[in-house]
Image (cartoon, rainbow, N blue to C red):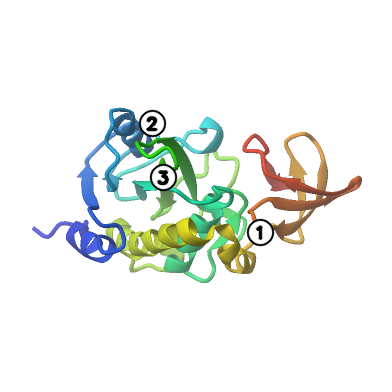
Amino acid sequence: MTSPWPLESVWEKAEPLLPGLTVELLPSIDSTNSELMRRARNGQHDPVLLVAEQQTAGRGRLGREWRSDPTASLTFSLGLVLAPRDWWGLSLAVGVAIAGALHPDVHLKWPNDLWVGDAKLGGILIETAPAADRQARYAIVGVGLNIRPRAAEGLSTPPAWVQQLRPELDAGAALLAIVPALAATLNRFQAEGFGSFQHAFARRDALKGREVRLSDGRTGVAQGVDGQGALLVHTAAGPVAITSSEVSVRPA
């Protein structure tokens, strides 16, 4: 029986971009990000793509739960050593890579969500751990995407799913489309930083020109992002640049 996961093809396309890359598939794990973080803390810093058919304790930004169902979701983490001059904007560059690999109608909600219309297609969670090289860190790029329809109950934002846009893509095919683009983006980000992705992000910016509310209660109109990936918001008190990971931004 043919595997629904084209892992060898993923490896063949991504390994030339990330030499030494290994690809692993787990039937179930608490969280692919958590597993790679455990490995990193034990000194394992080789590049690895870890794919889970099911996550039992997946995490989103600020510790939010990310539910993962077999065949209905794509959940994976890519771990590798990175040493960019500036880490700002990494999640936005990753979003540009994923959206570009999937469909023109996938937009990006600052700082780490993928949207179709006003519905959430998926999210990105980036964590880092110390690496042997003090100038670098082991970066773990976690991605969760809805592939097939899922219930909206209990979700603050209604869900979207990949097969709305590309019915032919199952989780394995989506993985094959995304990972090589992601690998190339991480190499480019390390060399050039977020500035080279700013215009591509702007073309997919889901918030630009919209009224937004910040978690501290301020409201304003989103005006895109700057060259370091900070969200620019025009408030009643004037323009502000939002960079803190503790700030939640939602359409007002």
- Residue labelled with disc 1: 227
Residue 221's place in the image compared with 167, above or below, is above
- Amino acid under label 3? Gly
Please tell me which of labels 3 and 1 falls first in the chain: 3
Q: Residue at 46%, 38% (x, y): give it.
A: 127
Task: Classify residue 40 as left or right of residue 233.
Answer: left
Q: Residue at 60%, 40% (x, y): give it.
A: 156
- Between tags 2 and 3, which lies in front? 3
Residue farthest toward the left in the current orientation of the protein: 1
Q: Are marks 1 and 2 in contact (CB under 8 Å)?
A: no
- Amino acid under label 1? Gly
Q: Residues within 10 Å of mark 2 (few under 14, many from 20)?
A: some
- Residue labelled with disc 3: 142
Which of the 4 image quadrants contains residue 162? bottom left
Q: Considering the numbered disc 2 on the image, is that residue within a helix, a strand or a loop? A: loop
Please tell me which of labels 1 and 2 falls first in the chain: 2
Q: Residue at 26%, 36% (x, y): give it.
A: 28
Residue 238's place in the image compared with 6, above or below, is above
Q: Nearer the viewer, residue 216 or 145?
A: 216
Relative image position of residue 155 (x, y in whole percent): 55, 40
